[in-house]
């Protein structure tokens, strides 16, 4: 996801900005840029792709005296990853960088365009700098213009502005996206969207609260709060450990990534929902012409998201859908017909088995689509069509946010096809789209829930096995819960369809067999409940996850009551992820780098 840095001081501004951006690389980005105001001159450099490209472009750019500078790594949301869309964005004589989303950018842009302002990019961010310059003409000074601009923005932002008429000042504002400012004994000022760029440079830091805005000069750090009251900075010491800084205070990357899911799902949805339809500008308009079947192919967690998709495609889009494990598919002489859309799903885009199935499908002349988290990966380059999941870099080997965003994309895609095939009514489609908008809320981790799971986890450190059970789309979630647990706890766990237990596995039931039961209120509740009762009657230890109380369980994790089972799916996803995490922590395992596993499996 996007990253911000800023610097005010006498040292090598270019180097400080570039190395700050390097520290933010792990968040993922597809273009980067810096703008520096030195000796009254505003200079800007941008490059698409990795930071080495920006380093190459700036190699002859010298910054050896007092300057102010801002920098940004951009993960494309509004508009493609091009130089024009990269930050910083220029007005007449000011530059802006911004993380987040300006929800009312279209209205502001229209008004500015009516006033004759020319826009160079397709981003929402560019309105900030033009609005600031428009206000400069009406206001008494730059800060007044900046304050007015901030009051006119709706949405989430962390933003920095520099302007030629005030060469010793950086303006800042934060609302909904993280940002901090640091300082040291030399009165340098540093901004960043997370701690790590400031480590080793700033002595103390102030984390901005939502609604904070203000400015820095060499001598001052002036902060106003959301009520426009001047407030004192609340400085704290900065950690000196870069790795822990990248974890933003979480114990593990996996934990951080579980907590990030609400935000990254919001990113996945950005620009893709209107009230009555799903917008995927990135795929060929005729992709589904002549298609009678969708075949999904993947490995591991991505396979589980594909399985969940098969329920949605058949239920919402009324299209035949089959799901394949890539390592099986590639050697079993599969029948491939041209009326099938072949879809590969991969977090990394590099998984060898999945990549090979994509090549097979292409050789067979099938239309192909990749759902992937990594732009420019081998699969993205290889497929005819691509939808990026926008989860940001996932560091924990055990995949969490990649899964969440894959399911979100599949849900959107099933509605996209439903619209094409008219398999849902307008009202049904509207209802589904409204539900999608509620997923970021459903995936917010509550402290109480996390605490409860932490406490419960101590009861699940032994036993001869776990069964995660669920019905319908909760079966793939059960598979995913079991995979998470075995990957990081090294305990044996299986995912099973609840209704299938009595056909064999129930023979294992005893108090040392742990059943993690997914009991959604709004999907086959009574059926699932009686399956769990069968296990309870045979003395299996039951941990039930539901919004409805269930007295046959030994342990019970209550999720929020939701209006639809799809929201329950996301609520329960958080629970099974946290449960695996906490069991693994108690067992003293390396949560982020479990034994024998690699993040990207590029061998067969
Ligand atoms: C997930 O927790 C695993 N580490 C693994 O199953 C992974 O999902 C699988 O290797 C597929 O990877 P991909 O999504 O990058 O293709």
Image: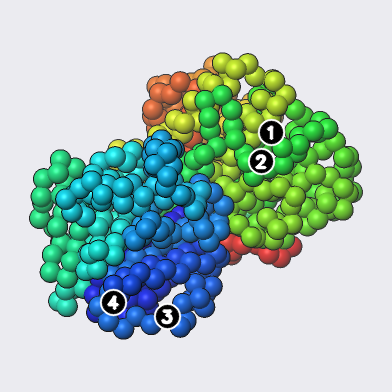
Name the residue at 57% across, 61% down. 599
Q: Secondary structure at mark 1?
A: helix
For disc 3, the neighbor class at 10 Å (few under 14, some 14 to 19, many from 20) is: few
Residue 584 locus on image (x, y percent): 44, 54
Label whose residue precedes the other's in the sequence (3 or 2): 3
Q: Where's residue 299, x and y in %?
A: 68, 51
What residue does disc 3 label?
61
The nearer-to-camera label among 4 and 3 is 4
* Residue to which mark 2 is pinned: 306
Residue tagged 1:
310
The verdict on label 2 being within 8 Å of ligand 1 is no
- Disc 4 Cβ-to-ligand 1 distance below 8 Å: no
Which of the two discs, 1 and 4, labels the residue nearer the N terminus?
4
Q: Quadrant of ligand 1?
A: bottom right
Instruction: Using a 10 Å C-alpha cutoff, classify the residue at mark 1 as few (fewer than 14 neighbours), some (14 to 19) or many (20 or more).
Output: many
Q: How far is mark 2 from mark 1, CA to CA? A: 6 Å
Disc 2, SS: helix
Asked if the residues shown at circle 2 and circle 1 are in contact, with their CB atoms under 8 angstroms apart, the answer is: yes
**Which residue is denoted by mark 4 in the rendering?**
39
Q: Of the residues under marks 4 and 3, which one precedes in the sequence?
A: 4
Q: Between tags 1 and 3, which lies in front?
A: 3
Tell me the quadrant of the picture where the C terminus can be found: bottom right
126 sits to left or right of 446: right
Spatial distance from mark 3 to mark 2, Cα to Cα? 48 Å
Structural distance between the alpha carbons of marks 4 and 3: 14 Å
């Amino acid at each position: 996801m996007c990253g911000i840095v800023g610097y005010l001081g006498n040292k090598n501004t270019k180097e400080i900005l570039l190395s700050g951006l390097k520290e933010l690389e792990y968040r993922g980005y597809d273009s980067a840029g810096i703008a520096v105001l030195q000796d009254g001159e505003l200079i800007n450099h941008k490059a698409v792709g990795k930071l080495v490209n920006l380093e190459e472009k700036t190699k002859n750019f010298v910054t050896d005296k007092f300057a102010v500078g801002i920098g940004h790594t951009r993960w494309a949301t509004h508009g493609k990853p091009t130089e024009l869309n990269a930050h910083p964005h220029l007005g007449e004589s000011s530059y802006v960088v911004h993380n987040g989303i300006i929800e009312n950018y279209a209205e502001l842009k229209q008004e500015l365009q009516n006033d004759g302002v020319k826009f160079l990019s397709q981003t929402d961010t560019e309105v900030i700098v033009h609005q600031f310059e428009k206000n400069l003409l009406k206001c008494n000074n730059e800060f007044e213009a900046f304050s007015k601009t901030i009051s006119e923005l709706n949405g989430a932002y962390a933003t920095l502005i520099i302007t030629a008429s005030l060469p010793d000042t950086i303006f800042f504002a934060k609302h909904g996206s993280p940002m901090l400012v640091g300082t040291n004994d030399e009165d340098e000022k540093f901004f960043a969207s997370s701690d790590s760029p400031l480590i080793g440079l700033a002595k103390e830091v102030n984390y901005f609260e939502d609604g904070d805005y203000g400015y820095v000069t060499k001598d001052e750090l002036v902060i106003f709060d959301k009520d426009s009251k001047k407030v004192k900075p609340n400085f704290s010491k900065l950690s000196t450990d870069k790795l822990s800084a990248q974890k933003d205070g979480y114990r593990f990357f996996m934990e951080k990534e579980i907590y990030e899911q609400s935000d990254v799902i919001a990113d996945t949805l950005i620009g893709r929902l209107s009230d009555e339809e799903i917008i995927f500008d990135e795929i060929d308009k005729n992709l589904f012409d002549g298609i009678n079947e969708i075949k999904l192919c993947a490995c591991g967690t991505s396979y589980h998201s594909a399985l969940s998709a098969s329920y949605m495609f058949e239920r919402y889009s009324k299209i035949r859908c089959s799901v394949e494990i890539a390592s099986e598919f590639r050697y079993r002489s599969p029948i491939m017909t041209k009326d099938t859309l072949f879809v590969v799903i991969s977090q990394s885009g590099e998984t060898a088995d999945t990549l090979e199935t994509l090549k097979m499908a292409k050789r067979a002349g099938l239309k192909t689509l990749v759902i992937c988290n990594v732009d420019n990966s081998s699969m993205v380059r290889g497929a005819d069509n691509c939808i990026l999941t926008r989860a940001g870099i996932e560091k924990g080997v055990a995949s969490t946010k990649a899964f969440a965003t894959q399911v979100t994309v599949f849900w959107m895609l099933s509605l996209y096809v439903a619209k094409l095939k008219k398999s849902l009514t307008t009202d049904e489609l509207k209802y589904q789209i409204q539900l999608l908008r509620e997923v970021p809320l459903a995936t917010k981790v509550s402290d109480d829930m996390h605490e409860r799971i932490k406490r419960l986890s101590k009861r699940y450190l032994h036993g001869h096995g776990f069964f995660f059970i669920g019905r319908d789309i909760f079966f793939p979630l059960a598979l995913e819960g079991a995979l998470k647990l075995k990957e990081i706890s090294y305990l044996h766990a299986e995912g099973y369809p609840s209704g299938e237990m009595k056909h064999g596995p129930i023979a294992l039931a005893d108090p040392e067999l742990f059943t993690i039961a997914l009991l959604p209120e709004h999907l086959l509740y009574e059926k699932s409940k009686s399956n769990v009762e069968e296990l309870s009657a045979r003395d299996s230890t039951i941990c039930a996850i539901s919004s409805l109380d269930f007295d046959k369980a030994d342990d019970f994790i209550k999720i929020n009551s939701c209006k639809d089972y799809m929201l329950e799916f996301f609520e329960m996803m958080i629970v099974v992820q946290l449960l695996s995490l906490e069991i693994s922590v108690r067992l003293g395992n390396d949560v982020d780098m479990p034994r024998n596993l690699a993040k990207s499996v590029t061998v067969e």
